[in-house]
Image (cartoon, coloured by chain):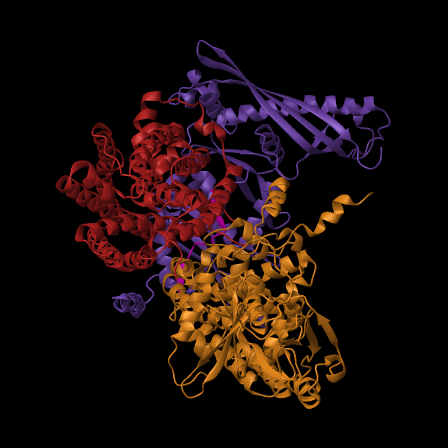
Chain colours: A purple, B red, C orange
Amino acid sequence: MKKTWHLSIIFSTTLLFLTSCWDQELLKESKLIYGAGLDYENENEIRTTFAVRNLGIPVSQGGVYSNRILSVSGSSPRDTRIKVDRVLSKQVTASKNQLILLGKEIARKDIDHIFDVLYRDPKGPLDARVGVVDGRAEDMLNLDHIGDTLITEFMSDLIKGAENKTEAPPMTIEKTFRYSKDVGQDYALPYIRFNEDVGAPEINGIALFHQSNFTGVVLPPFDATLLLLMADAKSKKASIVENIGKEHDQGFLTQTVTINIQNAKSDIEYSFQEGNISKAVIHLEVRGNIEEYPQNHLFKESQVENIADELSKKLTERGNNLLTKLQEANCDFLGIGRDLNAYHHEAWHPKQWDKEFTKLNIEAKVKVKISETGIIK
Amino acid sequence: MKTTSTINNAQLFFIIFQTQVGVGVLSLPSSLYAETGTDGWITLLITGGAIQFIIFILYFLCARFPTLTLYEFAPKIIGKYAAGSISVLYVAFAIATSVIVLELFETTIKTWILFRTPMLVILLLLTVSGTYLAVGKIKVMGRFYQFVSILILPLIVMSAYTLKDADIRYILPVGQNGFASILKATQNGIVSMLGFEIVLFIYPYVQNKGKAALKSLTLANIAVTTLYTFLTFTTFVFFSPNQLEVIPEPLVYMLKGISFVIVDRVDLIFLSIWIISVMTSYVSYLYIAGRGIQRLTKRKKTTGSILIASFIALFFSMFSHDRYTVEMLSGYHAKASYFFALGFPLMLLLISLLFKKKEESQ
Amino acid sequence: MRRGKRKSIRNEPYQIPTATESYEAFPSLEKNKEYILSQFHNTEDIKFRKLTIENITCKLAYLDPLVDEDKLQKTIMKPLMEKNTLNIEDTVTSKEYRSSVDLNEAVTGLTKGFVVLFIEGHQHFYLLEAFSANSRAVSEPINEQVVRGSHEGFVENIMQNLQMLRRRIENPNLVIRFFKVGKTTDTKLAIIYLQHLVNPELIDEVEKRITSIKTDSIQTPGYVEEFIEDSPFSPFPQMLSTERPDRLTAHIIEGRIGLLMEGSPSTLVMPVTFFAFYQSPEDYNSRWYIGSILRLIRVASFIFALGLPSLYIATVSFHSEVLPAELILNIKSSLENVPFPPLLEALIMQIILELLREAAIRLPGPIAQTIGIVGGLVIGTAIVEANLVSNMMIIVVALTAISSFAVPSYEMSMSIRLLGFPLMLLSASFGFIGLVFGLSIILIHLCSLETFGTPYFSPLAPLRLNELKDSIVRLPRWLLGDRPTDVHPQFNKQEWRSRRWKKNEND
């Protein structure tokens, strides 16, 4: 009995091996997509630009990596993937895609529909960075390389850099999925523009989204930082350069002060009227060090406080402008709707929130505190 | 020269724990969400309480017959023929559970990892290794379950890691869909936490019976409830509510976008560990079925009966293929499981109390 | 905690009898013999020799392995017989001479290589030195070398080996039983254990298994191992083979049984657990945290040696997406021009490696080094340049080989490398899923394996937290109050608060 039992195990195990490896996808047999750009082609078609990584000679033998940029049009992103697979040797895989660029035009359509394949595919790259391009994503990817860096690496490093400097929210495909399904919160993606002077792309602020559509409103990087601070989303670094008025301007290049923000605390205070929200006040308190103040040396505490007050005023002003823009775009970036749902549930009307938000009275109050002045006074 | 075929109380704990944690954990958050929205995690706490109640019933029943399994004490309570039919039903139930486990395992593996591998091969992988474990009898199962339980830690760490992207506001306000719906969802919770009924079949092998065993059972229930609540909680604060509607396996999906230092796609690692939990649940039911068949056919050794049970389970699991059929089948199975986890034991306990039937102590 | 410990010392029912109390000798020869035999638990290497001097019957008693035959003849027997006088002190010429009436002194003397001379009708007896100094060059076993610690190794002479053990454990409780096995060879086997410690059932079981051997010849301990082990189909060695007396001694003192064979320097220890193969005697010679880290490294080496190639294969042929974007390019670029699938690559490299290893063993030292250089450097570089095997695979296989050689036991290191092959097949067929199933089958096997009534994977499965401190790590000796319980020794305590002096110390 025992012997038959052993034999039966051995037989059934060997049976498994007699057949082939069904799901094998050899790494060396695959072509890796490292970046993709999506553009509006016409009413029923999309143009996808793929950056496929070439590996001719191994790097250990002196080879270099290069991208092959291919542009195809089709009725859906997956359709274009299938088409591009026809013109490429080996199996194309997008599982390590690092970058998805959206043309300005296509971003105004429903990106939920465009990203469906990324959400649905078990091998889809959920951690790829997403950015909106001023113009067409195709053109951006066709730059191929900036200096020595390939465009795909350049772009994703550019976006990651902006995230570290609190100039763009950390948005991956996973996050767009999360927020585009969320009624109570909207999001923004980094906005990339080709800088003609430098001849290279740059992060030119953030593109505000409502649900899953680009609203067409772009906030410049400085406003983006302020907005992110209001959303309590300070990243590793955050700096603010602000022009602080006439009495500080006494010479060449002396009208600004730069502060490096150590920490920021944001608190939203709501007021209600008849079970509806009537007003939201965003109290932002930032504590920072002076990074640059060319105009004078700061011997007295009162001088520092003076600067802080001035800054508070300026930033409050800026903040209010920025909030108006948000409302124009109908982009609830701060998640006020989410807050209402969570903490003031009775005032939360998900169906009317679209309208309520644009009419809402939102106000920003920024308070700046300065704790250090660098290593000199 | 062999070691004794008993299990200590820690092993009892891990057997119950591992049998309970199984294939259901992946889809639990979304099935709870479907019933009661983001309050699903509270449901699990209540479920834990309900299960504790059932555990008391099972324990009192077992404690009346400390050296007998259900297959052996049932004849003493309700007579040979009624007990025989109950035993047959339990065997059928255990095999059905194995089939459900196999099928859910197969569909999950097929959607997430091995897309083209034939169904039979995936089923065989689990069947062969599971049967090998089950024939090792209860002491080997105890050792194995205890050892692999350390793998729960990485699961917890991985899920806890996603908390950095969590938004607590997604589950607030607590209780927004009303208490009734929370209670109603309890049945979804109980189904995914089934497995404690194995105590009816392993109690005679426990070294320290009585209070110590009850303590192990209770701790196992607490551990499972805590783990499930934690895992469900993490998915609920990770995904925005509308997202949960469209994701059937949120726990895996959540980890798909996460990358640790040198590992991207943590979901693959998660699933690889989850396989072990599935295997342990499968083996537990195989063992229950095998013991039943052994008892019914009056064999001396369990090995043959476990083989028979695993063949039957394999045979039946080859029929349905798609997610929808499996969901329908597990729906029926869930309803039946109330009888086996609660109904029959309660009935047996009441009868044995009523007629004062008890194992004679020497 | 502390209180509990002290209590267990007080309640310890058994103390090691070290023959400190005196026990008066009998005038009767037979009674003395009886007592000594009982003290030695009827060990069979104790010898009694009858003499008649001045017409009085005398008896010489000695432990055979410890006594030098030449000395016994020249310094004791010959003078006694020739002079035929009971004036012992003036007659025998052995270099040490004592007279006593305490039989326990005789017992202690016997374990130290003395010959005891009893005289009928006399209560006092004589202890005469005849210690065997005979020893062939004892050298360190080359497959179990240590940096610090004893450099003694067993030799082919079973008596000399027993002598080494007797010298390491000078205790009458050390019992040796001899067996003659093999119809033609009539090989002498000996099992050695501590009577007061080892589980009696275990002794019976081992004796039962050895006596049931019916074979023509026993040529190596491997024959015995295959005859008496529990699971002959298991890939794991179930008895520890060692050529180090210190290693064997350590196991005997834990309550295990050692098996020695005439004509072979390697001895077997039974029952052992998996972790015994990962321990080296020098762990106890270094600082305890160094010893602990070494052990952890060895456990890691087990995991590497077993799973690294299969993990690599599964990753590059199924789940390349788990690699981060930067790493994947390095790996992919090294794979790009290799014509074989990863499984074949791994097999080629593993086979080359095994060939090299096998070739190097057979050759004399200096040539073996050449083989190493030719194999490692020349073939390694050439095979990458010829694009037959990728750089990555070379790294993986080399790491695997190094890890497997870090295991202190040769058999175990072979078993692990062997087990790597089915795992490689599984992961080449099913990726991570196959690997997980393969590993769990190995784990199930380890959990179900039992040798001589001892769970093989103890103390991990069944989990005994208290014993992990001397298996996966090595805590300071004074924290290891209890012996491992997997062998069910007759008493557990092995250390009685040796550092209690610390408490009484003034600042």
* Relative side of B163 to A301, left or right: left
**Residue at far right of view:** A299
- Return the x and y of residue C395 as percentages of the image width and height: 55, 69
**Residue at far top of view:** A274
Is residue C264 something that shows in the picture?
A: yes
**Residue at far bottom of view:** C82
- Return the x and y of residue C311 as percentages of the image width and height: 47, 62
- Return the x and y of residue B214 as percentages of the image width and height: 39, 36
Q: Nearer the viewer, residue C413 or C274?
A: C274
Asked which quadrant contains residue C157, the reply is bottom right
Is residue B322 something that shows in the picture?
A: no
| Magenta-colored stretch includes residue C390 | no
Check the image and report above or below for C305 versus B156.
below
From the image, which quarter does the N terminus of chain C lie in? top right
Q: Residue at x 40, y 70 (%)?
A: C208
Q: Nearer the viewer, residue C401 or C310?
A: C401
* Relative side of A140 to C479, left or right: left
Which stretch is magenta? A88-103
- Return the x and y of residue C326 as percentages of the image width and height: 55, 57
Q: Residue at x 69, y 52 (%)?
A: C498
Check the image and report above or below for C289 versus A192.
below
Asked which quadrant contains residue C213, the reply is bottom left
Q: Residue at x 49, y 29 (%)?
A: B168
From the image, which quarter does the C terminus of chain C lie in? top right
Check the image and report above or below for C201 versus A299.
below
Q: Nearer the viewer, residue C110 or C99?
A: C99
| Magenta-colored stretch includes residue A101 | yes
Q: Nearer the viewer, residue A367 or C72?
A: C72
